[in-house]
Image (tube, rainbow, N blue to C red):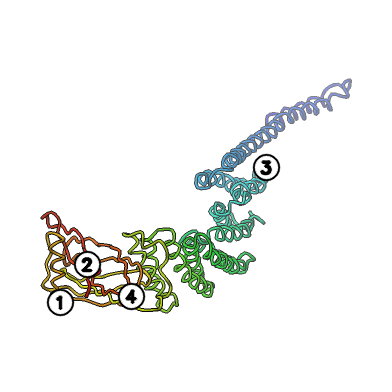
Amino acid sequence: MAFLLLAAADGARRALRTSQNWPLRTPLVFGIGLVLLAVPAGGVIAYDAARDEAVEEMLLDRLDKADKIVTAADGRDFDAAEDDYRTALAIYRDLGDDHPGSKAAKRVPDSLSTYYKSVAAPYDAHEYCAALAPLQYLRTLPGSLGKDRLGTLATWPDDRLATSLYECGNQGLGAGSTAGGDEFGELLRTFPDSDQAGKVEPAIREAITSRSSGLKGSDPCKATEELRSIGTTAKALPDSAGDGLSGDAANAVESGAYACGVDEFRDGKFKEAAKTLNDFAGTYKSNGKRDRAKDIAIAAEIAESRPAAGRSLPPAKSPGGAKLTYVIENGGPGPLEVLYTGPTTGTLKLSACGGCRTYTNRAQGKKACLAGKGYPNKTLHLPPGDYHFLYKRDASAVGGVRNNTEGSKIQPGYRYTDCSYVVTGGGLGDLDGLDGLNGLNG
């Protein structure tokens, strides 16, 4: 460029020395020199503009790439799409950090708005449990992008997350041992002053009320399990928020446990009924239905081996009138427990017969019982009627013994003696069962 300036100056000097016949030559020479100077200066400007435009296009391409990643991730499960979302976010962050004045950077806010909506898509679809993880993720972004850059997006997920925690927790109430508790607990800890947090207590109370009414329905066992789960949820709420609720649920569970056992008995699920009602009697010792539960559990245990004993619930009260003597003797080794149900229900235990042995056949056992050797015995006073008995001998004292059941019709005018002995089978040492003698006149 220095050379061009010198050439222009020399041209002007030469023009001044020439004849006056060329009055326009000097201006012309200066004009030519200016044109010569303008050409290289314009080239520099054009080059810089082209370079800047190329950079802008490159940055816009990067923005477009990130936007396409977000579009492709939209609608996918968040766990599967999270890495893609993070990749797109890194591009947005780099555009803002490294090229803040670029066209691409100026479009990043709009892209972030689309990004947030894509991540939170399950919320808009009312899939509140599925919305928890993506909304929790969005709440972490102000820490990496900065609140100033995000603007209103910084708090955009908050109300949506509070709503999702409430709805998901409410949907899960009663569905499992801790269902609903995690979501409600997080809601109360994270958004304690929110409208959604204020709905937790009424929601749990309503759940307890609705399940309690279900105890009189067709499936009290299911209602009881749900009440037990709701009580666990209420008890786990922070800051003792559910103390009163857990107590209400526990009271409902107590009623439900009894209702469930009775329902199982009526459905012929005798093993389950016996366990449910025995657990009830062992847990709620001051409950007014405890004795009734024990009677039904006894009948259920007998009915498990002798279904006729489970045709109907045992009578709630023993009938009045005369009672007949019924003596039960233990003519076998090991202690003996006898369960009975009929017009009245109960159980008794007899100590082991020290000198008793097992027999190879029933005839030997009956003969020994008829001999009246002073076996351990107890006397029952029973109203007349049909009875079902279950004999349970301590297997550890004899080895491999099976329980035995039998029926007996008790009629007025008789004194009954029932002697239980043990018979081994086939000389193999296996106990063939227990037997009893009914109606031995005394």
Q: Relative to 35, is 310 on the left or the right?
A: left
Which quadrant of the view contains residue 412? bottom left
Cβ–Cβ under 8 Å for marks 4 and 2: no
Q: Secondary structure at mark 2?
A: loop
The amino acid on which the numbered mark 2 sits, given as a three-letter code, is: Leu
Crowdedness of circle 2 by 10 Å Cα count: few (<14), some, many (20+)? Answer: some
Q: Residue 244 at what x, y percent from top left? A: 53, 75
Q: Which residue is mark 2?
A: 437
Q: Secondary structure at mark 1?
A: loop
User: Whole-Å distance between the Cαs marked 4 and 3?
Assistant: 99 Å
| For marks 2 and 3 on the same chain, the one whose residue lies earlier in the sequence | 3
Q: Residue 381 at what x, y percent from top left? A: 31, 77
* Residue 103 circle label: 3
Q: Which residue is mark 1?
A: 374
227 or 159: nearer the eye? 227
Q: Secondary structure at mark 3?
A: helix
Image quadrant in which the N terminus is located: top right
The amino acid on which the numbered mark 1 sits, given as a three-letter code, is: Gly
Q: Residue at x 89, y 20 (%)?
A: 21
Mark 4, mark 3: which one is toward the viewer? Answer: 4
